[in-house]
Amino acid sequence: MASVTLGALATDLANVAASKAAGRLAEAAFGPAQERELKALLGESIRALLDGLTRSGELAEDPDYVSGLRTKLSNFFSSEEVAYALVSVAVDSEPLPVGRLREIYEGRGYDPGAFPVTFERAMETCALHLARRIREEASAPEHPLHNFVEISKLYGLEGMVSETLRRTEPSGPKADELERASWTRCRRRWTTLGVAPDEAEILARNPAVGAPGPDVREQLGRPVNVIAAEAGSGKSLLLDRLMQRAIVRYRDEEYAPLPVFIDVARVRGELREAVVHGTRSLGRPEEVGAAVFLDGLEEAGRSEAGRLLEEAHYLPDVWPSTTVVVAGRPLQELEEEKEHGDPIELPELTAAETASLIRRFSGDDRVLDALLHGLPESVRKAVRRPLFATLVGLNMRNNYGRDARSVGELLSHLVERALKKSGEAVELKELRDLAVAVTDSASGRVRAGDVGTWTQVGRMRATGLVHEVDGTLRFSLQILSEWFAAQALELGEVDAEELASDFGRLERWRYPLVMAVSNFGYERVSRIFGPLVRAAPAFASQVADAAFDRYGSAEGGPADDAAVVTARLREAMGAWVEGLGPLAPLFAPIREDGSLGTLAITGSIWEPGMGKYAWYAGEVDLPDVVPYSRVVDSELKYGIPQRTYVVGRQASWPWGRTFKDLRGDLEKALKKRTLPAVTPMLAREAAWRTAKDLLHKEKRRSRYSDEPIALEEIETLFDECGVWDGGWIWRPPPRTSLRPVIYGASHLVEEVRRLRDSGESEMASPAPIEDRTLDEARRAMGNDDTMYTWDWYSEGRLLERARILVQETLHAYAKVAETLVPALRPHMPMAATLPGRIVGYLDVRSDTERREPLVSWYVEPLPPGYRNTSEISLETRPEAARPGLWEEYDARASYLRPKIAALRPQAAGWLAPVTEQLHSGQLFDSTPVTKTCRHLLWDDLRYAKWVTSMNPWTI
């Protein structure tokens, strides 16, 4: 397969070059036969070049390397100057201008050092093969090229190139051994991250992976180069790639410096002695020089690091052609290198490079935003470093498996990998204290004097994880700050009760809490998470959603016994129910007296760590815990979810299990049950809906008609059903079902009595209905063949309906938030914004097409205690003068954000401006306020992760 791939690539490149050199071939009077033969021989020669660039085809097994090679060489050979140079080897027996070709390759932004052979040797190999093959073929009198080339000149060119290649013949097993050692170091870096050995081997041997970019290459010209970069930046891999280039140079060039890679941890004594020892099998560095690569400077300690740097600057002065490249995490000693020239700072990966690396390991070819969807900002920043991009990609490879990590587990995994070389530094209390201070600050940095003495600050900086800029400290990555803050939570250095009650502080602690809940033991999580669940259930739900894996993967070690599982499930469920407040009776297992219901549970005899359970909160008085069979094998089982538990991989799994149970039950309850009629409009709409449904069932009245209903007609049904005292109307099941049809009649009875008391004889739609005649509606249709609901409404009536809908919905939702979800309200966007003023417009016109009316609006927060108001106007601007969707949002957001910061300070860290659009599905529903109110509630709960499916009230 590799041979076929390289053969096809060589043919394509030969065609590109021949096409670009068509002018030169015409000058040489080449006809079709000559061009055909030249292309074939040029293809063979380029194939020889590709063999060198792919290490005899070995790298051709790596599709990413071959793809990059195709892109770069296609661009390179498409240069007319390059094509002319190649053709001149055959036509004019001219040697390749290798130096000029290198300039062209570099000028196109490519790295000529990113190959397993020198660029010069690869090009000379191609030229030698081409000269030899042209000479061999053209020597035959009948060959098409026989009279078009000079055989004697080709002999001379062949000899000259052969001598050049002979002088730079590879120097044998010593260089090969160094190269294998470098590959081994590269391979271990990937295998320790979890990359499969075969894949790690391919990556290790690919010189383009981890190669220096153009900015870094520009800075590598000094005798001593210092690379200062944080954990995960790829500095050690870069150092090995530079080492491999030095090996290639040593192998292919006479009197090249001797390459040596030195781990600082293994240096004993002077650096000069370590270099002499490392090059003893290659030659004498004092005669030909050395290319020294010194890795892990931060591991030497500050005083030793300073000494090694001094010696590094000394070597180029005493040995010829000597260069030193030193790599380490940012240290004061590295920063002091400014007197010798600024240290080289490795740039972050570009978005394209990040996406490419994640795709490589994940096997997912989506765009970067899609790949990182749902991950926190700290991860989005971290993946601009190769280590973190690799780890995220590997995590995504199993993202849809049963053992996929949660966001919280991923965060901890990323940091713990990055800190493997930090040794005892990760135990420093100073780092935890700094993380707490940084997390509580709005800027992500604190004054150095506020977090420690000069000595303590020095110790923190010595880890390479903390930066000091203008007297302030910060972590090199936000994700590191979050991890150390989580450790402070675990050790009780942050008061969980105090944190849970401070909503303004909570948002900054989101991901430390996620890490803590994901990774710590059950008792510690309960101490941290329990207060949060009780005080801020809509924030705790977001933490739980990120902290627990999707499937609750089974524990691989000892499983909790049934008694422990029972106690923990009841503790967690009790905390959630307490936190939910008035919302809990709608769906949670609560008895009439408000106490937690009975847990019916059993463990599996055959599979420890597994069992079944159900919650019962009915009329039968049962103990807090009963055997599973007591409920599911009796008449008590009806309407009760029966579930299976698996002791999870995460110690705190009962918190996640109970949350997901409640979330599923809430979704079902919201879809099946009506909202409490907490405002007169909601009560009127409930009565109107019941009247329409009842008359459709009993009198075959159209369900879609909004014409008024005679009260006498409804009262007759009340007499027949005997429901004047309220309650429920029971009707026989339809032919297609065994279930009876039940209507809640209380709101309808109250509405009928209210209307009678006010002297009315009809029940009308709570919202204004259509006001156009059939002829008027047809005129509104124009030439269209379809009549829509809105064609029956004049602009004035539509505006009236929209204004009533928005104002009544605003009033109703504020009441729902106040009475039904007061505990969740502080962390739900719409509810947290209120009281507010809705400002919007009704758009009913289009300059080019018929379309549905649309109500677009935003919410401006008002001071607490103010009355909710709304202002809806008619859109009159022509379409050409209207801003685009995002342009309009940006304009609104820039106006609203300062108001949110001033009026909702506790939510300012997360609350974005609330904007909405009401479509015809809501605008023309027979109970539009109820539907829109449910729509807003669902969206708010979805933000808080209390529901997960799409909003059923959107359409």
Image (tube, grey):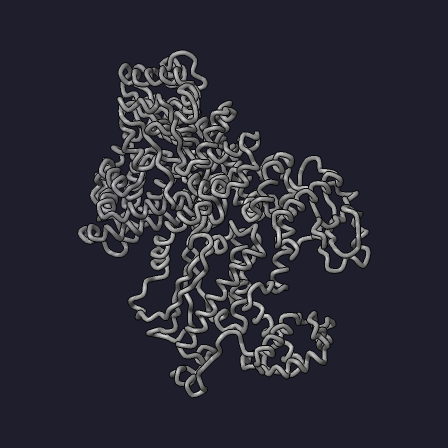
- Residue, far left: 27
Quadrant in the picture for residue 286: top left
Can residue 195 be seen at all in this image of the molecule?
A: no
Comparing 411 with 308, the one in front is: 411
Comparing 946 with 185, the one in front is: 946
Task: Tell whether 678 sits left or right of 640.
Answer: left
Give how far across and how far down residue 129 sits, in percent. 32, 40
Question: Number of labelled discs?
Answer: 0
Comparing 140 with 591, the one in front is: 591
Image position of 675 with respect to 401: above or below = below
Task: Tell whether 737 sits left or right of 695.
Answer: right
- Residue, far top: 269
Give how far across and how far down residue 29 sits, in percent. 19, 53
Image position of 448 with respect to 97: above or below = above
Question: Could you tell me which residue is drawn at 28 percent across and 55 percent down?
Answer: 33
Give how far across and how far down residue 737 sits, in percent. 71, 73
Can residue 589 be seen at all in this image of the molecule?
A: yes
Quadrant in the picture for residue 298: top left
Give how far across and how far down residue 517 sits, in percent. 58, 39
Image position of 22 with respect to 322: above or below = below
Task: Tell whether 204 sits left or right of 135.
Answer: right
